[in-house]
Amino acid sequence: MAFTRTQAALKSLLPKWAFMLLYEVASRVYRGLRWIVDEVYYSGSLLYYGFRKQSTNAKRIRTIYSIRRYTMVGRRGLLVTYDIANKIEEGNIDGCFVECGVAKGGCSALMAIVAGDNKSGRKVWMFDSFEGLPEPTAEDEPTVVDLIRQDKSRSALQKGYCLGTYEQVSNLLFSALGLGRENIFLVKGWFQDTLPEHKDRIGEISFLRIDGDWYESTKCCLENLYDNVVAGGYVLVDDYHLPGCRKAVDEFLYKRRLNVKLTPDGRGGGYFVKP
C-alpha cells in the first residue's frame, strides 16, 4: 500500500506527462534490478548447492527458475509455494492442490510440477477468469477505488490487470513444460460462478493458494473452499498485504473462530495450517 499511496501523491503533485515518464522509468529500473538480483540468487544457489552436492536443493532452485518468466509472484513467494507443496508431498497429506488466481500460470505450474515429480497422482485445480482482475469494491479501501475511477494511472492495480489467457496457461502447462493432462484441471470463469459448481468435484484439498487480490474474490475462495481443506493442510493468501484481501481473511478467521498463526511469506502474503 505504501507504493500505491506514493503513486497517488506523485500523481497529484506532478503534471501528467512528468508522472507517466517517472513511472515508466522507475518501473523499468525496478524490473531490471529485480531481474539482476534474482539471476544472481539463482545462479549462486545452483553453484553453492552443486558444489556441496545437495541435489534436492539444486532441484528446488532449477524448478523455480524454469517457471519464473510466467508469474508475477516474486522469488520469495515462489520459494514458499514450492516448499509448502513439497512438504505436503513428503508428509503424504491427502488432498489436491488448488490455486485461485492463475494469471499467466507460473505458480500453478510450480505446484503441478511438484505433484508430478513425486508421481503421487495428486490432482491440481486451477481457477481463473482469464480476463484479468474484476473491479475492486469499497471494501478494498475507498481511496484506492476513488483513485481508480478518477484516473487509472494512479493505482498499481485496476480492472483487467494480472491477465493471462486460457491458451497461454494451457500452452505453458502442456506444451512448454510437458505436464500430463490427466491430473490437471484448468477452469475458466469468475470465482462466484465456478467455485460453487466445482467444490464437490474437487474434494479434499491439501494446499489452497488464493491469489485474487480483492476482498470479494478472497472471501469467495475462503467461503467455498476452506471446508474442503484437510486438517494439517495449508492455506496461502498471496495478497494479504492488500487492505480488502486482509479484511476478508481476518473476517473469515474471526467468524469461524479459527485461532491460527499466519506466517508471512516474505513479500506481503501469508499462510497458515488448518487446525
Image (spheres, rainbow, N blue to C red):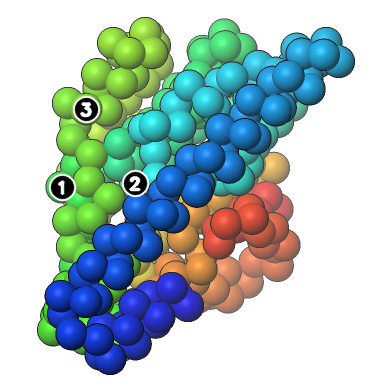
Q: Secondary structure at mark 2?
A: loop
The percent position of residue 195, horizontal first and vertical second, equals 30, 46
Residue bearing mark 2? 101
- Separation (CA) of disc 1 from disc 3: 12 Å
The type of residue carrying mark 2 is: Gly
The percent position of residue 118, horizontal first and vertical second, equals 61, 12
Image quarter of residue 114: top right
Q: Residue at x 68, y 50 (%)?
A: 273
**Pick the front one: 56 or 226:** 56
Residue bearing mark 3? 168
Which of disc 3 and disc 2 is earlier in sequence?
2
The percent position of residue 148, horizontal first and vertical second, equals 20, 77
- Separation (CA) of disc 2 from disc 3: 14 Å
Vertical placement of residue 194 versus 2, above or below: above
Residue bearing mark 1? 131
Which of disc 2 and disc 1 is earlier in sequence?
2
Position of residue 90 in the picture relative to residue 108 (left or right): right
Within-10-Å neighbours for mark 1: few <14, some 14–19, many 20+ = some
Q: Residue at x 44, y 26 (%)?
A: 67
The type of residue carrying mark 1 is: Glu
